[in-house]
Amino acid sequence: MTTTIPTIGFIGLGVMGGPMCRNIALKHEGDVTAFDMQTEAFDILKGTKAQKAGSVTEIAETADVVFLSLPGGHQVEQVCLGDNGLTNGGNRPSTIVDLSTTSVELSRSVASRLSELGIDFSDSPVARTREAAQRGELSIMVGASSELYKKIEPFLAYMGSDITHCGESGCGQVVKLANNALVFENTMALAEMMVVSERAGVRPEVLLDAVSKGSGDSFALRNHGWKSMLPRSFPERSFPPEYVIKDLGYMLELASQMGVTTHVTELAVRYYRATADNGRSGRYYPSVIEIIDRNVSLD
């Protein structure tokens, strides 16, 4: 019995999507096609077998399994179900895997509507850094039936070293939003303590070194603290405060639907909105430390 190797399509070659697609193209035995609206985005696929598609429709015509890495829920809905989307033509993929971060409600709605068309859909958002994406060492949180999870897990392993089946449709987004809220809030708290400690006479590098050896250690400290906030390096084409506000908005929406008031998350939105509004729009979000250092009002 011969098993056909599926063709994989990938849409969205941004900061995270580009490295993820490259790993798929290097590791998957079958064909890989990719699409992005920015021509220069395809540069990351040089030296791989990935083929450039001219449109979303072209991906739908050739791919069995399609991965999405898009800015947010609106784009995911349009690519899946819009007029020029994956389901608009005669040929459709059998499975769509969304690696983006969206609202739980929208993810479950898209899954339901695709199911009516005979298409499986999994929310499989990713966590960790761009460097982890390049190494194929992302953490991937999957919302899917057990049957679908078994089907897509080998493909997810091209991109991630830690893959967690979080539950049925939407549960991947629940866990991802919780993860993001925690790291954004931790980064904000770390920035406050770095500023306070420095003004009290402790050099920031000494603070980070000491705290990293104690119970205050965290991913945010070891990554954002050392690599970004200490040298005050906040490059563009990294995760900006606008994306933070979007993701925290999804969490606030979910919390409201669940009947939970989340004051810490609400405060984080105010901090990152001030970051975006005071000269750090489009820059890496740990630049929140400069807003704190300047005592910028959150009103």
Image (tube, grey):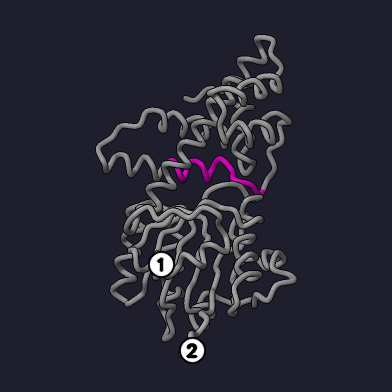
Q: Residue at x 41, y 77 (%)?
A: 94
Left or right of 96? Residue 108 is left
Left or right of 140? Residue 278 is right
Residue assigned mark 1: 150
| Quarter placement of the N terminus | bottom left
Q: Amino acid at mark 1?
A: Lys
Q: Residue at x 63, y 37 (%)?
A: 223
Q: Compared with residue 247, is residue 66 higher up or lower down, i.e. above or below?
A: below
Q: Main secondary structure of the magenta part?
A: helix
Mark 1 and mark 2 lie on one chain; the one further toward the N terminus is 2
Count the numbered circles shown: 2
Residue 182 x/y as whole percent: 46, 36
How many neighbours does mark 2 have within 10 angstroms: few (below 14), some (14-19), or many (20 or more)? few
Residue 95 x/y as whole percent: 42, 73
Which of the two residues, 155 or 80, is positioned nearer the viewer here? 155
Q: Compared with residue 108, is residue 84 higher up or lower down, i.e. above or below?
A: below
Spatial CA distance of label 1 from label 2 is: 20 Å
Outermost residue to the top? 200
Q: Residue at x 47, y 31 (%)?
A: 268
Magenta span contains residue 243: yes
State the SS at label 2: loop
Residue assigned mark 2: 2
State the SS at label 1: helix
Residue 97 x/y as whole percent: 45, 65
Residue 82 x/y as whole percent: 41, 70
How many neighbours does mark 1 have within 10 angstroms: few (below 14), some (14-19), or many (20 or more)? few
Q: Amino acid at mark 2?
A: Thr
Quadrant of residue 85 in the image?
A: bottom left
Q: Residue at x 46, y 34 (%)?
A: 269
Which of the two residues, 236 or 142, is positioned nearer the viewer here? 142
Q: Compared with residue 290, is residue 84 higher up or lower down, i.e. above or below?
A: below
Residue interval drawn in magenta = 237-248
